[in-house]
Image (cartoon, rainbow, N blue to C red):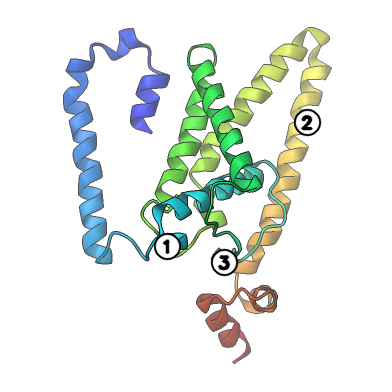
Amino acid sequence: ILLLHEVVLVDSKVRGPWKKRVPYYLALAVLMGGYLVVRHRVLGQSAQRGYWGGSLYATVCTMLPVALIYLRLMVFPVWLRVVYHPANYVRQTMWSVPVVVSVLVLVGLLVVAVWCRRRRPLVTFGLGVMAMGFVPVSNLLPMDAVLNERFMYLPVVGFCILVGVMVERLSVRFEPAGTRAVTGVLVVFGVMVLVCAGLAWAAGSLLLGGLTLAVGAGLALRAGEEERLLQRRFGETYA
């Protein structure tokens, strides 16, 4: 993200010749390498499991539609769930409607990022933060989970940057119409944020423990999503 900020948002005249920045880039590379080494030593492994679907190709086919689900959750955070069972999302082929649609959407976002590089650099930066936030959970190094709402904590920062840019542009567009129009735009977005926050809070209450968690776990189990953690917490609540 630091490199993205420097490349996208910092003027080349301020940044100076890239050769003078080499020590800085090397320092970042050393920090990243050190983190990966420490992570491997602590966890005792680089990956938590084998590739979903049995191959890297199947994992990519699986994660492309998942990326689209993440985008939908950021724009419209409803139908949140305690558990997203991996078996519901694993795919073996690229030639399916969800995968093809995901590829088209992601390519479209890439085109927007490139087009906005000079015109609206904050848009490019926001999309870049979203992309970088999803890389660690993209299962290129396989994890035990395919999809989790908590994986959006960092990417949603990029999404909020995009929302801020959109609100700013709409405010400028409606400014000639007077203060009331600008205020109306801000109020509409404020209401949308509060509604989405309420929906997210309601879903998050499932993780707060007690009877609420038990009910959430029971619903997950009835849906066939037998997660070990939920089973244990479900038993502890009623023990």
**Picture residue at 22% right of the left edge, 29% below the top:** 25
Amino acid type, label 2? Val
Question: In whole angstroms, how far apart are the C-alphas of marks 1 and 2?
Answer: 49 Å
| Residue at which label 2 appears | 187
**Picture residue at 68% right of the left edge, 24% below the top:** 167
Amino acid type, label 3? Ala
* Mark sitting on residue 54: 1
- Nearer the observer: mark 2 or 3; the answer is 3
Amino acid type, label 1? Gly
- Nearer the observer: mark 1 or 2; the answer is 1
Does 125 appear above or below 97? above
- Nearer the observer: mark 3 or 1; the answer is 1
The local crowd at label 2, few if under 14, some if 14 to 19, many if 20 or more residues have their Cα within 10 Å, is few
| Residue at which label 3 appears | 87
Left or right: residue 17 versus residue 143 is left
**Picture residue at 63% right of the left edge, 61% below the top:** 204
* Mark 3 secondary-structure assignment: helix
Residue 124 image offset from top left, x and y in percent: 50, 24
**Picture residue at 39% right of the left edge, 26% below the top:** 5
Mark 1 and mark 2 residues within 8 Å of each other at the beta carbon: no
Q: Along the line of sight, which residue is nearer the eye, 121 or 93? A: 93
Does 110 appear above or below 137? above
Mark 3 and mark 1 residues within 8 Å of each other at the beta carbon: no
The quadrant holding residue 47 is bottom left
Residue 158 image offset from top left, x and y in percent: 52, 35
The image quadrant where one finds the C terminus is: bottom right
Sooner in the amino-acid sequence: mark 2 or mark 3? 3
Residue at far bottom of view: 239
The local crowd at label 3, few if under 14, some if 14 to 19, many if 20 or more residues have their Cα within 10 Å, is few
Q: Along the line of sight, which residue is nearer the eye, 26 or 14? A: 26
